[in-house]
């Protein structure tokens, strides 16, 4: 293997990468080339960087053949996703229509139930985390809010509104329960009782 000889431009580029990169492996590779260009032996470089000398030899060979590109970290391709991207629209439709449209007696989807339903319909088996990552990547939210106000008792809602209004009008801040409503018949009976009852004497005629 020939000795590494760097031009001023090449040395400046390697020093810039060494100072700015956040990848320790790339920094070690740049440092190995710079040290070799100054005449340091591969065994000593390996000891300084804590790697095997064959690793240093591979770095120097790659730089000699490809330049700076030979020092870049080559990432292995990741494992392809188990859920095809073409099923994103189907999942969005399931979530939009709700579990009941798919024959499930539930109000909202969960990632586990979506994964189970995906397996039952397509035969693709995935875990909860894979379904969660897929949904988040496509902006699919399985948890939909459930509103109960429109399903409530209208009479109880009206009583609650009247009680709240009484609370706002109260000067001392205490809750004053709303008085029960009286029908016209009961109101007339109450007036008659006040007039002719035992608590109030009936008016007498003129004795003279």
Image (cartoon, rainbow, N blue to C red):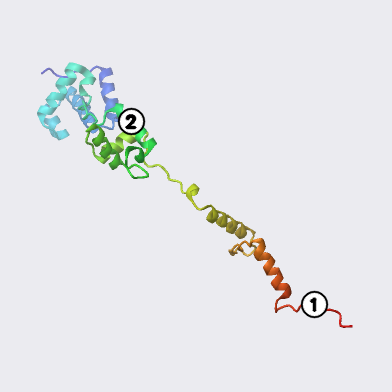
Residue at 64% across, 61% down: 183
Number of the label disc, if any, that sits on residue 90 = 2
| Quadrant of residue 42 within the rendered picture | top left
What element does badge 1 sit on?
A: loop
Dividing the image into 4 quarters, which one contains the N terminus?
top left
Q: Residue furthest right?
A: 208
From this view, report whether residue 203 is shown above or below residue 18. Answer: below
- Taking the image as shown, residue 153 lies to the left or right of residue 37, namely right
| Quadrant of residue 88 within the rendered picture | top left
Dividing the image into 4 quarters, which one contains the C terminus?
bottom right
Residue at 26% across, 39% down: 116
Q: Nearer the viewer, residue 183 or 41?
A: 183
- Taking the image as shown, residue 178 lies to the left or right of residue 114, namely right
From this view, report whether residue 127 is shown above or below residue 158. Answer: above
- Circle 2/circle 1 CB separation < 8 Å: no
Which callout, 2 or 1, points at the residue further toward the start of the chain? 2
- Residue 91, position as x, y percentages in the image: 33, 33
Number of the label disc, if any, that sits on residue 203 = 1
Q: Nearer the viewer, residue 81 or 60?
A: 81
- Residue 16, position as x, y percentages in the image: 30, 25
From this view, report whether residue 95 is shown above or below residue 41. Answer: below
Residue at 55% across, 55% down: 155
What element does badge 2 sit on?
A: helix
Nearer the observer: mark 2 or 1; the answer is 1
Q: CA distance from mark 2 to mark 1?
A: 84 Å
Q: Nearer the viewer, residue 7 or 98?
A: 98
* Count of numbered labels shown in the rendering: 2
Residue at 27% across, 38% down: 117
């Amino acid at each position: 293997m020939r000795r590494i000889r760097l031009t001023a431009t090449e040395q400046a580029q390697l020093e810039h990468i060494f100072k700015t990169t956040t990848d320790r492996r790339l920094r070690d590779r740049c440092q190995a080339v710079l040290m070799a260009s100054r005449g340091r032996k591969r065994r000593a470089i390996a000891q300084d960087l804590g790697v095997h000398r064959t690793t240093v030899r591979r770095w120097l060979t790659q730089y000699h053949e490809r330049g700076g590109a030979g020092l870049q970290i080559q990432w292995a391709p990741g494992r392809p996703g188990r859920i095809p991207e073409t099923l994103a629209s189907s999942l969005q439709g399931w979530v939009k229509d709700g579990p009941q449209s798919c024959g499930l007696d539930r109000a909202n989807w969960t990632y586990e139930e979506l994964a189970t339903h995906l397996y039952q319909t397509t035969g693709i088996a995935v875990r909860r985390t894979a379904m969660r990552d897929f949904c988040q990547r496509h902006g699919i939210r399985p948890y939909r809010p459930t509103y109960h106000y429109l399903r409530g008792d209208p009479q109880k809602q009206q009583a609650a509104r009247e009680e709240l209004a009484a609370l706002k009008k109260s000067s001392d801040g205490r809750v004053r329960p709303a008085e029960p409503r009286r029908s016209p018949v009961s109101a007339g009976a109450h007036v008659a009782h006040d007039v002719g009852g035992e608590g109030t004497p009936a008016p007498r005629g003129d004795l003279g």
